[in-house]
Image (cartoon, rainbow, N blue to C red):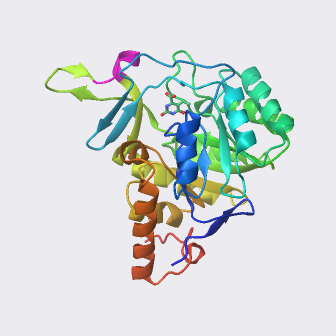
Amino acid sequence: PDLATSFLEQPLDNPLMNAAGVWCTLAAQLDALVESSAGALVTKSCTLSRRDGNAEPRYRALPLGSINSMGLPNEGYAYYLDYAACHDYERKPLFVSVSGLSLDDNLTIVAALREAVLPAFLELNLSCPNVEGKPQPGYDFEAMDQFLAEVATAYRRPFGVKLPPYFDFVHFDTAAEILNRYDNLAFITCINSIGNGLVIDTDSESTVIRPKDGFGGLGGDYVLPTALANVNAFYRRCPGKTIIGCGGVQTGAHVFQHLLAGATLVQVGTALHEEGPSIFDRLQHELRELMAKKGYSRIEEFRGRLKTL
Ligand SMILES: C=Cc1c(C(=O)O)[nH]c(=O)[nH]c1=O
C-alpha cells in the first residue's frame, strides 16, 4: 500500500507529522523531524519574544497518556521564521504554529510570516490552555471571530487554525459557522489537549505537575474519542476545508481511524514525546499492514468514509 497523499495541492510521502509543541522547540529537534520519516513537521507555537514557560515539573507521562502545563516556552517567533527560511520545502512541508498572547502580537507575527514569503503553512493556535490569565480564544467565539477576521485579512494567504476540543453540538455548529466565513482559512487542526485536567498521585496524595495547582492539558489515550469526534464534526460541517487530525495517536490503527473520520494529515503528540521520531516508521509500517489486510492500496480509498450504523 502507498501512503502518498497531498495537502493543499502539496504532495507528501505520508500523512504523518508531529503535533505542535512536541519535539519542535529547538532547531536540533526540528532537524530530527526533517531527518525522520514524518511526512511534514510543525514548529512549537511561538510568541513575540522568547519565553521560559512555567515552573517544572510541567509535563508528566502517564499510563494512559500525558498531562502538561508547559506555559508556552519557545524561542520567540523570529527564531522559527529563521528556521522556516532555511528549510528545504522540496523535502517535506513545514508548518509554523503561532500562539501570540494577544491579537496584536498575532498580527505582528503573521505580518512577518507574510513578508517572509515562505512556502510554510501558518497554523494559528487558538487553544493554548496553559497561560495563566489567558482564556483560550477557541472557547470565546466572539474573540475567535475577531481574531480570524483580522488575521485572515492581514495574512491573505491560506492558513489554518488549531482548535481546542468541543463537547457539544451547538459548539461544533457555532465554531464551524465562524470558520466557514473565511475563505483563506484552508485547514482546521483538531484537537489541542483537553484543557485543565487534574492528575493525582495516590501515594504522595499530591498533584503531579507544579503549575496551576496541577491542572494541565491531557493527551494520549484519554483524548482519542474526543479527537475523532472533533475531526469528524468539522469534516462534516466544513466541506470546503481540509482537516488535520491530532489526539490520541499511538498505533497505525489510530492513524487509520483519524483518516476514516475525515483527516487528511495526522499529528502525533504524546506518543512522539515518549517514543521519539522513530515512531513515524512504526506508525507507517502498522498503517500499511492494516491497509493491506483490508485490501486498500491508497488512503483516498477510505479517507472520510466512516460508516454509521
Ligand atoms: C501553545 C501552548 C500549549 C501548551 C503549552 O505550551 O503549555 N500545551 C498544550 O497542551 N497546548 C498548547 O497549545
Q: Residue at x 35, y 37 (%)?
A: 66
Q: Is residue 187 above or below residue 281?
A: above
Q: Is residue 268 above or below residue 52?
A: below
In which quadrant of the rendered view does residue 154 lie? Answer: top right
Residue furthest to the left: 203
In which quadrant of the rendered view does residue 217 lie? Answer: top left
Q: Looking at the rendering, in which quadrant would you find the C terminus?
A: bottom left
Q: Is residue 161 magenta?
A: no
Q: Is residue 12 above or below residue 113?
A: below
Picture coordinates of residue 26 (x, y %)? 56, 33
Q: Residue at x 44, y 25 (%)?
A: 69
Q: Residue 35, can we see it? A: yes
Q: Is residue 52 left or right of residue 286?
A: right
| Viewer-nearest residue: 212 or 120 | 120
Picture coordinates of residue 296 (x, y %)? 50, 81
In which quadrant of the rendered view does residue 78 lie? Answer: top right
Q: Residue at x 58, y 50 (%)?
A: 34
Q: Is residue 302 left or right of residue 106?
A: left
Q: Is residue 154 left or right of residue 32?
A: right
Q: Is residue 98 left or right of residue 309?
A: right
Q: Which residues are magenta?
A: 208-214
